[in-house]
Image (tube, rainbow, N blue to C red):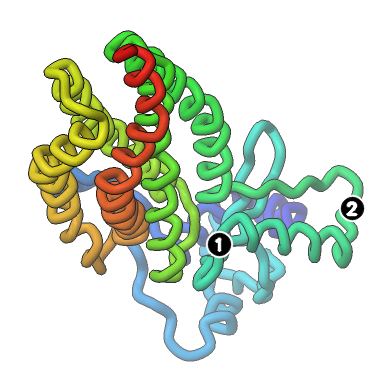
Amino acid sequence: MDRLRSGRLGINADALQSQLRSEIEGLQVGTVIEQGARVPLMLRHAKLQGDGLEQMRNNLISLDEGGAIPLDELADIRRVEGPVSISRESGQRFAVIRTDVQDRDLVGFVDEAREVIGNSVDLPEGYTLEWGGEFENQQRAAARLALVVPVALLLIAFLLFLTFRSVTQTLIILSNIPFALTGGLIGLWLTGEFLSVPASVGFIALLGIAVLNGVVLMSHFNYLKARGMEVSQVVREGALRRLRPVMMTATICAFGLVPLLLATGPGSEIQKPLAIVVIGGLISSTLLTLFLLPITYRRFLRPRLKEATV
């Protein structure tokens, strides 16, 4: 706006600028509530046809003393490119660059992007670069998991020790955890998925299922041992008798996650990794638990039984 010329003609430059803005962008005259959402009610002029810029220059502005003057004589009217809006955070301006990562892991992409930008882009003084969005959430979740998982394992080990009163049996049950993790990692590798926060949550769920299967077998082994059976007979009979409960636990959990595994709509990027990890871990954990846990039990408890017999 040419404020000096507008003042000489008795025109309020700020009022004229607001009027022009409302003509171009529209004027909000109220709010309409539709299905629980608040939608602004806008009043807009008919869209200018042809060269709207030239028509705006020739737009006549009425004067108080009579007559009219083209808008071009009161303002510098030209088409420029600039930001639609200026956003601020913590008192500083910021701009967001968005990107979608496909067919590779998010952390690896950010690490590579950081290296490339660090080597090729020199930020002016006062500028900073931050990586946010899903990557920021994943880093925050990973930091929490790094604290939660060890604490959970210690609590599980403590409860197992209180249940069986044996460090050896506690360690034998905890040995099921690597079996479950192996199946989850193989599942991610076969499906081309990457380790993410949902996948990490799936691994945590596997910890509980693997320990549960171990507790089921170990409890029955101890029951049969208390009845005076030999160790070889204990592991054979115990594994056969607890085959059905262990298979039922794994099968129910696996079939319950099949809908998540086949999901394709919104949210499938969260559901699929979790389902893949849990189903893959259930397969490996169940099979290895039924075969390796009895062997481990027989290996570490046979000497102790012999000494007790003597």
As drawn, 66 above or below 179: below
Q: Residues within 10 Å of mark 2 (few under 14, many from 20)?
A: few
Q: CA distance from mark 1 to mark 2?
A: 30 Å
Residue 152 appears at what percent x and percent y?
A: 42, 23
Residue 78 appears at what percent x and percent y?
A: 68, 75
Residue located 34% across and 9% down the image: 165
Residue 87 appears at what percent x and percent y?
A: 60, 46
Viewer-side residue, 41 vs 284: 284
Q: Quadrant of the N terminus?
A: bottom right
Sooner in the amino-acid sequence: mark 1 or mark 2: 1
Residue 43 appears at what percent x and percent y?
A: 31, 59
Do the CB atoms of the residues marked 1 and 2 lie less than 8 Å apart?
no
Viewer-side residue, 280 vs 124: 280
**Residue 284 visible in this rendered orientation of the protein:** yes
Question: Under tag 2, what secondary structure?
Answer: loop
What is the residue that sits farthest to the front in this orientation? Answer: 310
Question: Mark 1 highlights which residue?
Answer: 105
Specify whether 147 is left or right of 263: right
Q: Quadrant of the C terminus?
A: top left
Specify whether 83 is left or right of 45: right
Question: Under tag 1, what secondary structure?
Answer: loop
Marks 1 and 2: which is nearer the front? 1
Question: Mark 2 highlights which residue?
Answer: 124
